[in-house]
Image (tube, helix red, strand yellow):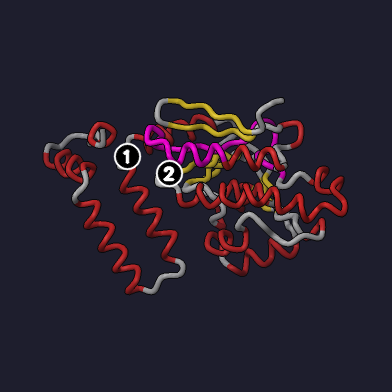
Amino acid sequence: MTDPVLIDHRDAVAWLTLNRPEAGNAIDAALARRLRELVEDVADDTAVRCVVLQGRGRLFCAGGDVSALHAAGAERPRLLRTILTDLHPAIARLARMEKPVITAINGPAAGAGLVLAAVGDMALAAPEAHFTMAYSRIGLSPDAGTSWLLPRLIGLRRTQELALTNRRVSAPEAESMGLVTRVLPKGELEAAVVALAHELVDGATAALGATKRLLLASGSASLDEALDAEREQIVAQGGSSESAEGFAALVERRTPAFRIAVR
């Protein structure tokens, strides 16, 4: 059977590819389980310094596998629980991973696929990508962290509109509202993702991980709590080999070699 999620290690970058193109990379139980396994693997692999998530084929991800959910009939609640038991931890680990995550949004994304597209620390999209919630169209409420992530990215008011109306958002509009980081000209997505990944793997990965932790916590932290967390993080990072290399490179007027410094 074809693996529903592929992994390809290129230097220090792990490329994860949703691999159900005939089904629009829709999320079934097997895909959710394999995605969780691979996300956990790359998160724990110290040789991986950046992760890219992309879809194979015309779509990035159509969301949940509607055909399978329809066929489940009375067993639909059980199937939903099975899928989300794997999908939700995978999304949480992508968001909290101690290394940068890039989403390469090659085409349309809907439902949980929209969250998979948006969860990247940097989300780069092709011009043919578009986005829609689609949940209420089939009588469901959101999952996959939609109600947590989207208000933080685009605001509560916009999220309310998109969730309640299922309005389709084009790639340029998604960029303007902050749902994606950048839209690339047609045919330039892969090259842009490769260049960004190479830039990030040469960066101060531990410092980037600390930055991710601070930003994720900021939504529920008071100013004093944020200041305390920033103090502890920068003090800890100040004693790291990354910091020593960064300061040395600055004084010596050279490019820092962070990848060598942490070995």
> Could you tell me which residue is drawn at 34 percent across and 53 percent down?
210
Quadrant of image for the N terminus: top right
> Could you tell me which residue is drawn at 52 percent across and 40 percent down?
39
User: Looking at the rendered structure, which numbered label has been put on residue 100?
Assistant: 2
- Tell me the SS state at disc 2: loop
- Tell me the SS state at disc 1: loop
Region of the chain picked out in magenta, as a range: 37-62
User: Looking at the rendered structure, which numbered label has been put on residue 140?
Assistant: none
Q: Taking the image as drawn, is residue 184 in sight?
A: no
For the residues labelled 1 and 2, the Cα–Cα distance comes to 10 Å
Residue 188's place in the image compared with 29, above or below, is: above
Q: Which residue is mark 1?
A: 203
> Could you tell me which residue is drawn at 75 percent across and 57 percent down?
135
| Picture quadrant of residue 183 | top right
- Residue nearest the viewer, comparing 137 with 165: 137
Picture coordinates of residue 158, whole percent (x, y): 63, 65
Q: Do the residues bearing badges 1 and 2 touch, measured as CB atoms within 8 Å?
A: yes
Residue 11's place in the image compared with 248, above or below, is: above
Tell whether position 52 is magenta.
yes
Q: How many marks?
A: 2
User: Label 1 crowding class (10 Å Cα cut-off): few <14, some 14-19, many 20+?
Assistant: many
Amino acid type shown at disc 1: Gly
